[in-house]
């Protein structure tokens, strides 16, 4: 494990998959500070951290419909 990175497992539902109810489990590595923020947000709203992450991903994808290039640099860590 890299220093300062927290392992996080979540279920990710794409918009298309939401209609069928199917979920696919995926794993992401989050910087420690981001992980703490996600946990705090989840606790404050009485939801799981997976729910917070899932909603963030769905929102992000909804704002990028039709785009094929990522709007940030090539750092893939």
Image (cartoon, rainbow, N blue to C red):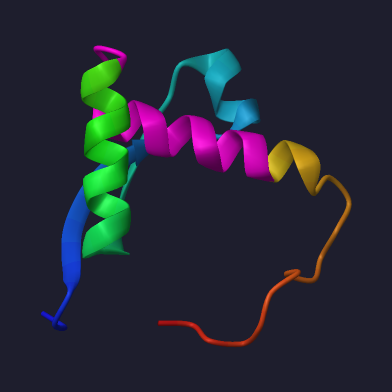
> Is the magenta region chiefly helix, strand or loop?
helix
In this view, the residue in front, 17 or 75, is 75
Looking at the picture, how far across and down is residue 16, in whole percent? 64, 28
Query: Which residue occupies the extreme right position in the image?
Result: 66
Q: Is residue 53 on the magenta stretch?
A: yes
Q: Quadrant of residue 27?
A: bottom left
| Span highlighted in magenta in the image | 45-60
Residue beneath the point at 40% across and 39% down:
53
Residue beneath the point at 68% across and 44% down:
61
Q: Is residue 63 on the magenta stretch?
A: no
Q: Is residue 27 visible?
A: no
Residue 52, compared with residue 5, is above or below; it is above
Looking at the picture, how far across and down is residue 15, in whole percent? 63, 28
Image quadrant holding the C terminus, namely bottom left
Looking at the picture, how far across and down is residue 9, in whole percent? 21, 48
Q: Is residue 63 visible?
A: yes
Image quadrant holding the N terminus, namely bottom left
Q: Is residue 33 left or right of residue 21?
A: left
Residue 50, compared with residue 35, is above or below; it is above
Residue beneath the point at 52% across and 38% down:
56
Q: Is residue 3 left or right of residue 39?
A: left
Total tally of numbered discs in the picture: 0
């Amino acid at each position: 494990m890299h220093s300062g990175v927290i392992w996080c497992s979540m279920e990710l539902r794409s918009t298309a998959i939401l209609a069928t109810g199917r979920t696919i489990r995926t794993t992401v590595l989050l910087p420690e500070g981001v992980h703490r923020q996600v946990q705090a947000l989840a606790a404050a709203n009485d939801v799981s951290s997976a729910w917070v992450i899932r909603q963030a991903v769905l929102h992000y994808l909804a704002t990028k419909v039709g785009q094929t290039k990522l709007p940030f640099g090539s750092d893939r860590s």
